[in-house]
Amino acid sequence: RYQMSTDGQLNLFASHQLTDTSSQFSVLIFDLPFTFSMQQVVRLTVYEAGYRQQLTSRDQLYLSAARRYQEFETTGETEEIDSFSARWNHQFSPMISGYLFGTYEYRRYSEFDREDNEREIGFGLQANLYRNLELEGFVALRNQTSDDRLYDYDEMRIGVKATYYPRY
């Protein structure tokens, strides 16, 4: 983290790790179920840069750009993701705040020789009802286009979250 000014902060993150993934699928042959599992090692590399700016006492802007690269050791497949996101927060009162956000992701899959573009925009509200209870709700529109039309879609996402922090 680097404090650029009293109102701005730059965050840089890099990670390279080994992890694993597993897939499971079942096939029914002559009314007999066969279940197959596959596990493989994944090399995950992530680079991310973010900038947070306090615009006013009630407004904050956050911008981030990231690159993720996954290499699956067993199959040799790769997935690359380049993304950009922006979020603007506004404090309406000491207890209620709102936000607008947008994201863009560009994905490449070597196994399928496929490229996807995903965009999402949305807004949300957060309320701190008590010292230890927060409620949040959001609505977002997501659109994905792909060079394989089978993976094109539009969707609306609606979410509600309650967070309770117990007191000890």
Image (spheres, rainbow, N blue to C red):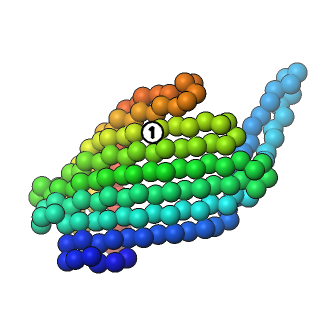
Q: In the picture, residue 95 is in which quadrant?
A: bottom left
Residue 68 is left or right of residue 96, and the answer is right
Picture residue at 74% right of the left edge, 42% below the top: 24
- Measured from the top left, where is residue 94 in percent x and y? 13, 62
Picture residue at 24% right of the left edge, 71% below the top: 8
The residue nearer to you, when weighing 156 against 115, is 115
Q: In which quarter of the image is the C terminus?
A: bottom left
Q: In the picture, residue 5 is in which quadrant?
A: bottom left
Picture residue at 56% right of the left edge, 68% below the top: 15
Element carrying mark 1: strand
- Measured from the top left, where is residue 76 in percent x and y? 75, 50
Residue 28 is left or right of residue 101, and the answer is right
Q: Can residue 15 be seen in the rendering of this structure?
A: yes
Q: Looking at the picture, which amino acid does disc 1 mark?
A: Glu
In the rendered image, which residue does mark 1 sit on?
118
Looking at the image, is 63 positioned above or below residue 106? below
The residue nearer to you, when weighing 40 against 47, is 47
- Measured from the top left, where is residue 2 in percent x and y? 34, 78
Q: In the picture, residue 154 is in which quadrant?
A: top left
Picture residue at 41% right of the left edge, 33% below the top: 143
